[in-house]
Amino acid sequence: MLALFALTVSVPAFAQGANITIWFTGDDTGAAIMQEVAQGWAEQTGNTVSVSAVSWGDAYATALAAVADGSGADIIVGGMSWGISLGQLGGMVDLGAQFPDQVAQIEEQSTPAFWDSIVTPAGQVFYLPYNLDLMLMYYVPGAFEAAGVSVPTTWEEMAVAADAGLLGGQSWGNASWVGFQSILGQAGASWYADDCSAAAINSDEGRLALEQFAAQYDSLGFPAEQVPVSDAFATGAHAYVIDGEWTATGINAAHPELEGQWDVTTLPAGPAGFTAFLGGKGMGILSYSPNIEAAMDLMMYLSTPEAAQMTAELNLANANSIFVPPQPANYQFILGGENVAAAIAAQLEDVSAPPNCPGWEESNADVELVLQSVLFEEMDFQDALDEIEAILNQGLADFS
Amino acid sequence: MCAMEDAMSAESLPAKIPEQVSVARVGKSRPAPVWVRMWRSRISYLMLAPFLLPFFIFIIFPLFQSATVSLFDYSAVATDTADFVGLDNFIHLISLEVRELPPLFDEASNERMFQCGRNRLPESEVAAWEAEEGRACAPAFVRSRDVLSEGFGEWRTFSLFGTQYVLGATDARFYTALMNTFVFAFWTVLLRIILGLMVALILRKQTRANYVLRMIFFLPSVTASIAVTVVWGWIFKGQPYGLINYLLMQTGVVTSPISFLNDAAWTMPILILMTVWGGIGYNMILFLAGLQNINAELYEVAAIDGAGPWARFSRITFPLLRPTMLYVLITSIIGAFQVFEIVYILFAGSEGIGGVLDSGLTVVPYLYDQGFRLFNMGYASAIAWILFIIIFALTLVNLRVGRANEAY
């Protein structure tokens, strides 16, 4: 009886011999790494997997065309907001409805901030987490030592560094809502109420965030333009730069003379914390796929610790890049140097992903214009908060 | 010249007479039905098929499909939920309204309010602020959002006869994109034509040095635009190591780098510069071809008559180049209104698809953003049709003006 039970559990609930096609958003190396990892699943189940790379610029439109046409890949691995936007248009399988047990298991293991961002307010789950990207602060310790000031761990210390002539900069999220969201979290504010019933940014905390955002570009020396970390450090133009974790492995490659000259840590804290923007990739099944069961099984496999470890190792070895698994239990597999792994792990304690509220995708370009008006046209803070609140509430009304 | 034309007309006259008679005779008989004429010409149609089929499949069908889609709220993914919205997409795109912005007064003191940097101050505090900051405050007005109708957002504010107004639009970003496109088209077309013609005139003589120089000027036209744009991005990088900034700082012109690509004041001039640089050579080749067709004897005769260089240019070269000019003008306008890749490559980073404050946003990137980021295919199609109508109207005007000025 027990043997019979074991047999029914171990036999996959889908026919063998399926060929699962994955569109991996990124470069060929990333696709090859996923192909190698997925091979383990293919051998276990007797299916085949073929992974092809689609560039960031084309992937979203490619998925759109595939869904409209009803043919293409079974799984797409791409931007974290795509699951909801494609899913609500009927282009993705609602995994939460079709595989409630597996989805509950993944939810339990996942980084909460990321999970909250990929689930719709109505509880639909079109995506499972694949990897995380997060902001970190890169800095040149020697510059701070020479100036006799400490590496900024708070907003106040950023001001002290600026007074000492040590200027900051931002690469990922520069002058945009992405960069502002980190500060929003540091100030203790958020775009929307937790239940997405209304915009929540028009608050004292929201104003504080806006003031700090403006101060970065006014008095803290952040230039209007994105600052590439390695070039900024090599030229000595900036003492610290905020950028994604992927930059860590590229600095020494671009400028070997910088080896040992830089370090990385968490973002400077505001009154509510040292929040960093959290992005990453998710993976979901396109609605027309004839292999939904097998595709789900493969995604479950890709979420295992073994797959996470293998992906992390292959990324570092083949692409000189850092893979951050989306499960806290798998953070142990983060590679790229002790200091980098430690900074990533520390920063993951306080991260904030894009909101999942209706209308956000449609509203964020207008929100960004208001933020840029604050930075570059001296828009009144309260006017800006009122304007952003109106934009977000209009989005909620139009798309709820 | 006129005598020569008359002579030519006289020579060709006898040949035309029988043809006119023949046409008149046919006109009197009853024409065969269309299907009969088509059947008689079936071999011709069959031979035209290799062109006609792709033409209908890839040009005519998408054109009508796009026109149809522009009348729907259509996402391309959720095809079953496409709602017919009639002209709503077009109305939402082009709706404008003008409202007066009343001056702002302090509720408590009833003092006139001024905008001083990010601070809104009563008139009594303005002088102190201006003295401290060393810059001027501006009169504050009621917020645009408070006077505009629901659904309208501020596009521009302007002052007329001492009164402040706001120009509101239901899609302010579209108008920003449209205005940017017009500015971009005006300057790029004008400069490319003037400079292209100048270079063509300078390099007109068939010498080895001119062949080399022509090739050098034409090189940007055959270089991959994406690669060129990336290089321009480096040239204008807003860091001390950006090429222009490096030169400016080394020569002491500036002390800190200029953020060329993230400064709304610089964005459009840089886009224009890049496009003009890349397009001079192409126009030069077209003008050179046009110049080769001008009979050299005309210049000799004019020189004998005592015509100077300017007279020869304005009376011979320019008028006889008019067909070439018209072609260059129309194709340049079409190209300018369709600009996409340089905007996309330079600005589609984290600061938004049109750069800071949408200062580099043009119509086609905006169309792309609506269609392929937000899935508003119906709306994107409506934008495409408005763009088509604008280009079509400009082309018609150019053709009409070109023909009206035909003197030779």
Image: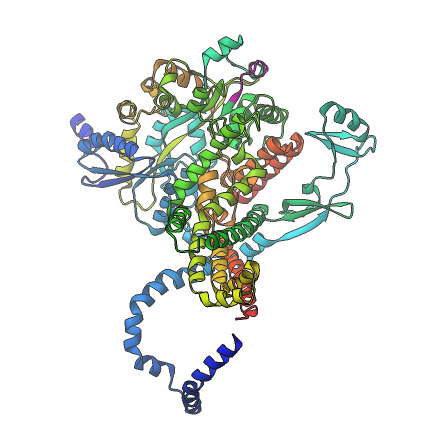
Q: Nearer the viewer, residue B67 or B265?
A: B265
Residue at image location 40% in from the left, 27% down from the top = A133
Where's residue A19, x and y in %?
22, 41
> Which quadrant holds residue A387?
top right
Q: Is residue B14 above or below residue A11?
A: below
Q: Nearer the viewer, residue A317 or A97?
A: A317
Give, as a single range, the part of the protein colored magenta.
Answer: A160-168
Which quarter of the rendered picture does the N terminus of chain A lie within? top left
Where's residue B113, x and y in %?
77, 33
Per the image, is B39 magenta? no
Where's residue A350, x and y in %?
47, 20
Q: Nearer the viewer, residue B394 or B318?
A: B318
Q: Nearer the viewer, residue A216 or A83?
A: A216
Residue at image location 37% in from the left, 45% down from the top = B223
Q: Check the image and tell me how it is coloured.
A: rainbow
Q: Is residue B141 above or below residue A344?
A: below
Per the image, is A167 magenta? yes
